[in-house]
Amino acid sequence: MANITVNLKVWRQAGPKEQGQFKTYTVATDTDTSFLETLDILNEQLVEKGEEPIVFDHDCREGICGMCSLYINGHPHGPATGATTCQLYMRRFKDGETITVEPWRSAAFPVIKDLMVDRNAFDKIQQAGGYVSFNCGGAQDANALPISKEAADLAMDAASCIGCGACVAACKNGSAMLFVSAKVSQFALLPQGQIERARRARAMVKRMDELGFGNCTNTGACAAECPKNISLSNIARLNREFINAKIKD
């Protein structure tokens, strides 16, 4: 462990309709401290001075929920690959370095205050079609629904998406295709998801477009910045699912 001092250039915005600006703060921390803990230290200093603390989103701080959605030095969740902001440690930065911290930048994710954005758009896409129908009653025997190892692995990989929005923040078009494709794929690959298969693809893509997300142009930035390493192959699957659904229409 080593003590370091960094300059945090933080986006401050009082509300959705207010004009925002960057403000720089100097904070002393150490290399074993997480990035969110460093923000906690800074907020304690601000409160002691009688200043308004920085608003940022967080919950589990275990890399599970995706709430810690910060744009750090040009990267969603920061420079660490396959990790969320709460899993980012100050050892990634140099003593005296200036670190730029911003909220997600997307028309579909309006700023609530400072570094916190409204990500309810993802919930609305999920509600449009992210569920399965099944018969009530006793649980079926596991062997009654044979699923190949390959399909199960692909479905689990897609289901690991935590809906943090890093894909949208990384995309130059603000596209949500990686998120939507992961949610469509996790059901389309399994027998339980077949009943609503066509309707799901149509409904979720339609809702995504209605909410103002941009188009996918296959630059791959979404997958490169995804903290859960969701594969671009899911987008190809979503396109197939959507085309098949339109053909059925």
Image (spheres, rainbow, N blue to C red):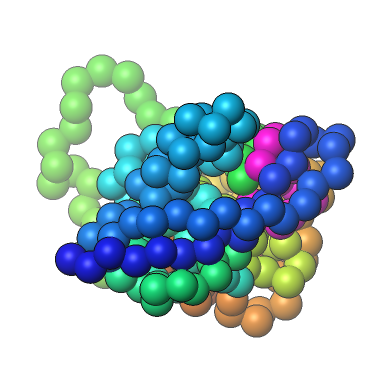
Assign the magenta stretch its main secondary structure.
loop
Count of numbered tags: 0
- Name which residue lies at 53% across and 37% down: 46
- Name which residue lies at 23% across and 60% down: 32
Give the vertical position of 50 relative to 76 (above or below).
above
Q: Quadrant of residue 74?
A: bottom right
- Name which residue lies at 62% across and 31% down: 52
Q: Is residue 43 magenta?
A: no
- Image quarter hosting the N terminus: bottom left
In the image, taking residue 90 as reference, residue 236 lies left or right, namely right
Q: In the image as oriented, which residue stretches furthest toward the bottom?
A: 219
Give the vertical position of 175 relative to 97 (above or below).
above
Highlighted magenta segment, given as a residue range: 102-114
Q: Quadrant of residue 104?
A: bottom right
On the image, the x and y values in percent for residue 132 come to 45, 36
Q: Is residue 21 visible?
A: yes
On the image, the x and y values in percent for residue 82 come to 36, 68
Closer to us: 91 or 65: 91
On the image, the x and y values in percent for residue 121 come to 67, 40
Closer to us: 42 or 220: 42
In the image, taking residue 34 as reference, residue 68 lies left or right, namely right
Q: Quadrant of residue 160?
A: bottom left
Q: Is residue 184 visible?
A: no
On the image, the x and y values in percent for residue 143 come to 13, 46
- Name which residue lies at 33% across and 43% down: 61
Closer to us: 104 or 218: 104
Closer to us: 230 or 8: 8
Q: In the image as oriented, which residue stretches furthest toward the front?
A: 49
